[in-house]
Structure formats: C-alpha cells, structure tokens
Image (cartoon, rainbow, N blue to C red):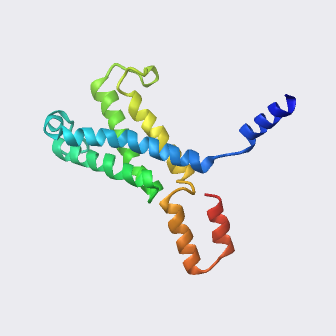
C-alpha cells in the first residue's frame, strides 16, 4: 500500500502536462470569448442600440471591432496561430470593458469590492487568462510550434534554435 501511495504521489507531482494544459486554457478561453461574439453577432440589431461607444468610436463601430476581436482572436488563439500576438487585442478590449464597467456603470464601487455577482468580474478573469497565455506561450500543441519546426528544418538544423524551441 505504501508503495502504491508513493507511486501515486510521484506520478501526480513528477509528470507535467504543460502542453496539454496550455491547449486546454487556449480552447477554454477561446470558446468562452467566442460565445460572446456569436451572441452579439446574432443579436446585432438589438445590441448595437445599447452598445457603448468607446475610444472615440460610435456604438456601431465599437460593436463591430469587439465582434472581430471576440471571433477572430478567439479562433487564432484556439488553433495556436500567432497566439501571443492574438492575445493583445482581447487584453486591450477587456481593459476598456473593465474601465467602462467600473467608472461608468458602477461609479461608487471600489475595485477591491468586486464580487462574482458584479459585472466587473468577467473582464478581470479574461485579462488574467490572456496574460497567462501571453507569458506562457501556446505550447507544443499549436500551429505556432509546427510552423516553427518547419522554418527551422527548412533553414537546416541549428542547435541553438532547436534547443530554444524545446523550451516552448
């Protein structure tokens, strides 16, 4: 029994599935944000009337930009193509959404008093997940990795580039 518990402990702590975890988080956040974009696209005529104009754009242009970010960047992140670059527009969009929610809709709310029932909760979660993807990268189960392998093999095997790619 002791041997079994030791093996169980070692297998739970000794093996890492970082590439699977990165794939999971990319798919999870991509699907989560994409469903917002699909919902806004389907209900475009109703949403455009109430969608706020931000950064000097009118409400219709703001909604179009947000739908493009939600659908386009989510798709790029899910397949792992230009992943780090594709996280930047959603991070900016979520920062703008958080600013709009906290300063326009909830003027008397302190940032430290946000609860899961308040609207400021969701953009903060998205910002955190996108920052993780930006820092951690897409992992080996991504188009970025496969394209990098192709580019390195086309150039010829350079040991430093191969070692650097193994870090991904």
Where residue 68 sits: x, y (%)?
Answer: 28, 50
Tell me the quarter of the picture where residue 43 sits: top left
Q: Is residue 162 visible?
A: yes
Where residue 126 sits: x, y (%)?
Answer: 43, 38
Left or right, residue 5 beside residue 102: right
Left or right, residue 168 beside residue 72: right
Left or right, residue 60 beside residue 2: left
Q: Residue at x 25, y 48 (%)?
A: 65
Where residue 73 sits: x, y (%)?
Answer: 37, 51
Where residue 70 sits: x, y (%)?
Answer: 32, 46
Q: Quadrant of the N terminus?
A: top right
Q: Residue at x 57, y 80 (%)?
A: 155
Q: Residue at x 22, y 47 (%)?
A: 64
Q: Residue at x 47, y 55 (%)?
A: 84
User: Compared to 127, does 71 lie above or below?
Assistant: below
Q: Is residue 131 visible?
A: no
Number of marks: 0
* Residue occupying the far right of the picture: 2
User: Compared to 55, does 138 lie above or below?
Assistant: below
Tell me the quarter of the picture where residue 28 sits: top left
Q: Quadrant of the C terminus?
A: bottom right
User: Compared to 115, does 39 lie above or below?
Assistant: below
């Amino acid at each position: 029994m002791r041997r079994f518990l030791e093996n169980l402990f070692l297998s739970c702590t000794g093996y890492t599935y970082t590439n699977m975890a990165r794939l999971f988080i990319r798919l999870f956040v991509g699907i989560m944000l994409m469903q917002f974009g699909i919902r806004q696209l389907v209900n475009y005529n109703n949403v455009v009337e109430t969608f706020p104009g931000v950064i000097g754009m009118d409400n219709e242009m703001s909604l179009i930009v947000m739908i493009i970010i939600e659908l386009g960047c989510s798709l790029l992140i899910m397949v792992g193509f230009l992943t780090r670059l594709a996280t930047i527009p959603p991070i900016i969009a979520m920062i703008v959404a958080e600013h709009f929610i906290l300063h326009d809709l909830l003027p008397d709310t302190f940032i430290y008093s946000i609860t899961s029932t308040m609207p400021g909760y969701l953009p903060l979660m998205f910002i955190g997940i996108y920052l993780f993807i930006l820092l951690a990268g897409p992992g080996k189960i991504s188009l970025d990795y496969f394209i990098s392998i192709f580019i390195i093999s086309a150039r010829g095997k350079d040991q430093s580039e191969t070692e650097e790619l193994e870090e991904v």
